[in-house]
């Protein structure tokens, strides 16, 4: 059993499971004996108790009736992507075309991730091969050297005979 109870000090509403001897208000932290609290609703499921609390809060705020989130069409709320881009001064078609130019998995990756991906893509990941791979993906050689050094210090990669191996 679940009950929606209210605090006599701060008027907060919360859901209590079963019938504990005492319960604490989540807002003001006052401890109340459960039997002395007013139960605004009692239900068999937690979802129904949460829904009842939401209805009580909506009535208290005088915002009209409670709207069940499951009945809201999320697609119809707010503005469309195209409208948002247009309001921001961007051409929606150009933005879509820019996104399409990226290949699969070519999203925004960190320099570290590009270097780690090089270990997967290269058969023998040497310094030069990793730098070349990273350069193709927009990472400068100095950044590659810095990332490789950090990876070695962290024990994530090792280098033997000039070839890196991921641990």
Image (spheres, rainbow, N blue to C red):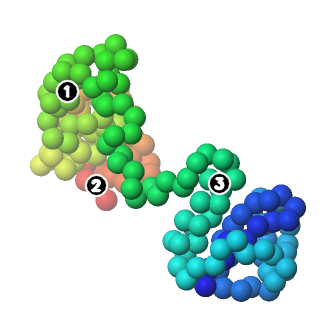
Residue 38 in view, yes or no: yes
Residue at position x 83%, y 58% from top?
A: 10
The residue lying toward the viewer, choosing from 72 and 14, is 72
Q: Earlier in the sequence, mark 3 or mark 2?
A: 3
Q: Which residue is most to the top?
A: 89
Residue at position x 20%, y 19% from top?
A: 94
**Badge 1: residue crowd in 10 Å (few <14, some 14–19, many ≥20):** few
Which residue is under mark 3? 59
Q: CA distance from mark 3 to mark 1?
A: 44 Å
Q: Using the image, tell me which numbered label, if any, was put on residue 166.
A: 2
Q: How far across and how far down the image is residue 80, in percent?
A: 31, 31
Q: CA distance from mark 1 to mark 2?
A: 36 Å
**Badge 3: residue crowd in 10 Å (few <14, some 14–19, many ≥20):** few
**Badge 2: residue crowd in 10 Å (few <14, some 14–19, many ≥20):** some
Q: Relative to 141, is 76 above or below?
A: below
**Residue at disc 2, secondary structure:** strand
Quarter occupied by residue 141: top left
Which residue is under mark 1? 96
Give the mark toward the camera: 3 or 2: 3
Q: How far across and how far down the image is residue 14, in percent?
A: 69, 67
Residue at position x 36%, y 17% from top?
A: 87
Quarter occupied by residue 102: top left
Give the mark toward the camera: 3 or 1: 3
Q: Earlier in the sequence, mark 1 or mark 2?
A: 1
Q: How far across and how far down the image is residue 150, in percent?
A: 42, 43
**Residue at disc 1, secondary structure:** helix
Q: Earlier in the sequence, mark 3 or mark 1?
A: 3
């Amino acid at each position: 059993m679940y009950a929606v109870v209210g605090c006599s000090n701060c008027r907060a509403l919360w859901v209590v499971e079963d019938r504990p001897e005492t319960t604490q208000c989540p807002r003001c932290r006052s401890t109340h004996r459960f039997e002395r609290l007013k139960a605004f609703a009692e239900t068999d499921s937690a979802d129904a108790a949460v829904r009842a609390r939401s209805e009580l809060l909506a009535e208290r705020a005088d915002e009209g009736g409670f709207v069940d989130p499951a009945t809201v069409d999320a697609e119809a709320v707010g503005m469309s992507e195209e409208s948002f881009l247009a309001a921001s001064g961007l051409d929606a078609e150009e933005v879509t075309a820019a996104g399409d130019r990226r290949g699969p998995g070519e999203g925004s990756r960190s320099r570290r991730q590009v270097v780690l991906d090089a270990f997967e893509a290269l058969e023998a990941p040497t310094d030069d091969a990793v730098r070349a791979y990273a350069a193709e993906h927009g990472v400068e050689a100095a950044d590659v050297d810095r990332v490789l050094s950090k990876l070695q210090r962290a024990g994530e990669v090792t280098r033997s005979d000039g070839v890196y191996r991921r641990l």
